[in-house]
Image: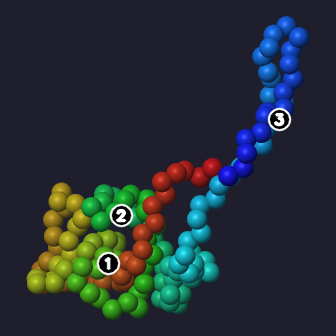
Amino acid sequence: MDELLDWPCEQTPESDIGVVVAATIRLYRRRPDPSPKPQSVHDWLIRRPFATYLVKAEGRSMSDHGIHHGSLLVVDRSCDLHDGDIVIAGCADGFLVKQYRTKPVRLVAGNTDYPDIVLERAPQFDLDGVVIASLTRHRGAA
């Protein structure tokens, strides 16, 4: 560790108080991340550009899954569908974001205030894609 040095200062004639003229500080950086880093966020999020699109979430039905009003969703149309996936489901009235569940096949909201949609009783819903990521802004644009 470096030895402490006296601060350069000027003495005022009226008192013995020192006034700092200049100071130097050291900035410490975070340790570098040992894991390999992706080339870009785009490369990390979008694996199949031809089948991927972005959509902005509206409403509060998926808040328990971390998808909030205004979240940006990355949707992949070419993913295999698995139990528990978050999906985009389309119908005549628009699109929904829900969790796909089996036994029985249904769409489940991430908020208990919203009912399940059993797909056997609601054949008008088409599954459009799997949500592979959601991005939520925590600070407004500067």
In three-dimensional space, the C-alpha distance between marks 2 and 1, rounded to whole angstroms, equals 12 Å
| Residue 22 versus residue 15 in the image, above or below | below
- Crowdedness near tag 1: few (<14), some (14–19) or many (≥20) residues, C-alpha within 10 Å: many
Q: Is residue 15 left or right of residue 53?
A: right
Residue tagged by mark 3? 22
Identify the residue at image location x=59%, y=52%: 141
Q: Nearer the viewer, residue 21 or 41?
A: 21
Q: Residue at x 42, y 84 (%)?
A: 76
Q: Look at the picture and state if 80 lies above or below 86.
A: below
Q: How many marks are shown on the rendered structure?
A: 3
- In the image, residue 46 lies at what x, y percent? 51, 82
Q: Amino acid at mark 3?
A: Ala
Residue 100 spot, x, y in % from top left: 24, 79
Q: Could you tell me which secondary element the residue under label 1 belongs to? A: strand
Q: Against 44, is 142 above or below?
A: above
Return the residue nearer the eye: 127 or 133: 133
Residue 137 position in % (x across, y down) = 49, 57
Q: Secondary structure at mark 2?
A: loop
For label 1, the residue is 87
Q: Is residue 18 left or right of residue 58?
A: right
Q: In which quadrant of the rendered view does residue 92 lie?
A: bottom left
Three-letter code, disc 1: Val
Tell me: residue 124, above or below residue 67: below
Nearest to N terminus: mark 3 or mark 2: 3
The residue that mark 2 highlights is 67
Q: Residues within 10 Å of mark 3 (few under 14, many from 20)?
A: few
Q: Point out the frontmost of discs 3 and 2.
A: 3
